[in-house]
């Protein structure tokens, strides 16, 4: 399932066009799982776990970190 999600997100193909012969399951099933896991906070937890592990190993260079409008939410009416 995860392989199917990663394949679609990395190639940019539509969910319905996920080739069944790759063995990743239905594109629509992958899409549903992605949404369910997103709503359950799975991806945020996984992201945090990866960052924690890399940080413990000294493999993060925060001097090269940046934020963009996708990761930093703008509050309405704030100037």
Image (tube, helix red, strand yellow):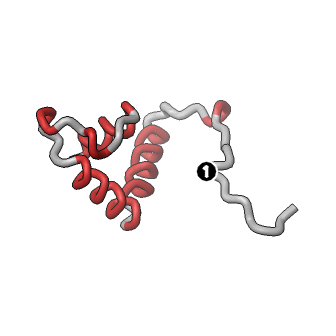
Q: Which residue is mark 1?
A: 71
Residue under the image location 38 percent in, 39 percent down:
9
Residue in the foreground of this view, choosing between 17 and 23: 17
The quarter of the picture where residue 40 lies is bottom left
Question: Could you tell whether 72 is left or right of 48 in the image?
Answer: right
**Residue at image location 47% in from the left, 44% down from the top:** 51
Q: Is residue 26 left or right of residue 16?
A: left
- Where disc 1 sits, the SS reads loop
| Residue 61 vertical placement versus 2 (above, below) | above
Q: Quadrant of the C terminus?
A: bottom right
Number of other residues with Cα within 10 Å of mark 1, as a class: few under 14, some 14 to 19, many 20 or more:
few
Residue 63 position by quadrant: top right
| Residue 62 picture location, percent across and down | 62, 36
Q: Is residue 31 left or right of residue 48?
A: left
Residue 74 appears in which quarter of the rendering? bottom right
Query: Quick one: 40 or 7, which is closer to the camera?
Result: 7
The residue at 43%/35% (across/down) is 57
The answer to which of 42 and 8 lies nearer the viewer is: 8
Residue 64 shown left or right of residue 32 in the figure: right
- Residue 70, x across and y down, in percent: 62, 49
């Amino acid at each position: 399932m995860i392989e199917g999600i990663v394949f679609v997100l990395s190639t940019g193909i539509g969910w319905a066009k996920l080739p069944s012969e790759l063995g990743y399951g239905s594109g629509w099933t992958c899409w549903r799982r992605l949404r369910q896991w997103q709503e359950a906070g799975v991806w945020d937890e996984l992201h945090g776990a990866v960052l924690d592990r890399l940080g413990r190993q000294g493999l993060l260079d925060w001097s090269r970190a940046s934020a963009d409008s996708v990761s930093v939410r703008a509050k309405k009416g704030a100037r």
